[in-house]
Amino acid sequence: MDGVNLTLKPTKKYKTNQILISFTTNIKNQKEITARTLLADLLETTSLHLPTQRDVALKLSELYGASFGTSVSRYGNVYGVNFIINVVNDEYLAETTHILEDTFAFLNEVIFSPQIKDGEFVADIFQIQKQNLQAFLASLDDNKQGKALTRMNALYFRDQLQQIPAVGQLEDLSGITAKQMAQYYHKMITEDQVNIVVSGDVTRQQVKSAIKVMPFVARSHKQLDLVYSQPDSTLVKYSDEHENVSQSKLNLAYNLPVDHDSQDRFAAMVFNELFGGCALSLLFQNVREKNSLAYYAESDYDIFRQELWVQTGIQSENKEQVIDVVGQQLSQLRQGKIQQEQLDKIKASMINSYIARSDSQSVDLSKALTTSLTGVLTPPKQWIANITAVQIEDIARIANRAHLQAVYFLDGRQD
């Protein structure tokens, strides 16, 4: 069906079946980011025929203790509302059941039968979830590491949509009404691209038969604008804020343009691990361990937003020295001054982690969704071969693309 994609991951490895249904779109209005988080909460907790959270819990109990939840996600410019359910495979039940059909019937209920009356979400349900989300968004500032990351992104990104966390922001919540939420819901249900992933010991015919209960309709197939990129700025942005906290936060953001479907993405993965992505990295060893300049020092990379960032927790007086030492580690990588033994250990660690994650059904689901969104499929053996093939000169080439763009400092110095 146009705009509705089904991916089946048949496997006998697990005793459960997992189903992921993701509604994805490009967003142009920043308030809609927050609204979609509220929508995910509304659809997770009640429905027309399951009007209380207790009713939902009882229904899941009838599905032999199935677990269910919703979430929101961001892949570059693409935002998703996700429904995930994990239910035992009926082969492991003593009695004959139709649990796959019953599971899709439950998903049909929570997705397609929300508590909307007279064109708006039922008032008391809407207010409860809005207040819950308000409390959650207000609490995000309590996590100072997360707060520093958000402030760094607000400094780094020029697009306001990218500055906002994927879960939204408090200031956009108050103006959202129950009627607007109903409008957002109908827009999502009828216009979003839909990706359905099913993992477990099931056949395509079983899934196609069970899914018929869900009234998906064709929608115009849109080529989603996935990757966000911005050109380098010749000036580095700096922002210092003060707050009485026990540990200062120093974050650095770099522009690192690497195409998500290019061979260079494997070199970018290895580069990030070597730079600050693990305990074997240069940042961990030289900022944290050797020079004792940080409580933590790590890097991460978002290939869909082409952003590399460094997070550190430090004493305020060490700020300039930490900036210098981080710069030295990047300079070392740019020059190809890398010990082959360290590179080999990094790659071996990445491959071991990849193999270990392959035993996770949730990871399989997430990978399948990413493949549906990007159209890029890398079989496990090829992934391992591509990581193994990364050489020192590849790391240096990627490192030379990383350009510092923003420095955010949350000064915890006591007055």
Image (tube, rainbow, N blue to C red):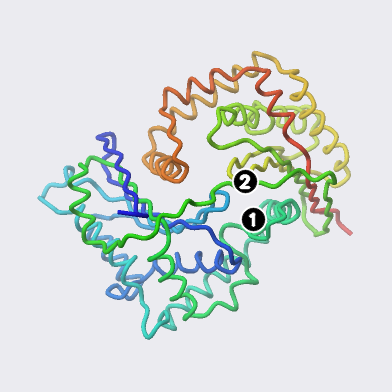
The total of numbered circles placed on residues is 2
The answer to whether 24 appears left or right of 229 in the picture is left
x, y (%) of residue 231?
73, 45
Give how far across and how far down residue 24 sits, in percent: 45, 56
Q: Split into 4 quadrants, where in the image is the N terminus?
A: bottom left
Mark 1 to mark 2 CA distance (whole Å): 9 Å
Q: Tell me the amino acid under the disc marked 1.
A: Gln
Which of the 4 image quadrants contains residue 367? top left
Give 72 or 191, whichever is nearer the viewer: 191
Q: Earlier in the sequence, mark 1 or mark 2?
A: 1
**Drawn side of residue 320 relative to residue 64, left or right:** right
Please report the residue visible at 22 percent of the width from the left and 49 percent of the height from the top. 207
Instruction: Look at the numbered discs 1 and 2 and tell me whether their residues touch, using CB distance below 8 Å.
Output: yes
In which quadrant of the rendered view does residue 329 lie? top right
User: Residue at left 27%, top 55%?
Assistant: 65
Residue 159 is situated, as x and y percent measured from the top left of the image, at 68, 57
Figure check: 266 above or below 413: above
* Extreme residue toward the bottom, this view: 118
Give me the disc on residue 162.
1
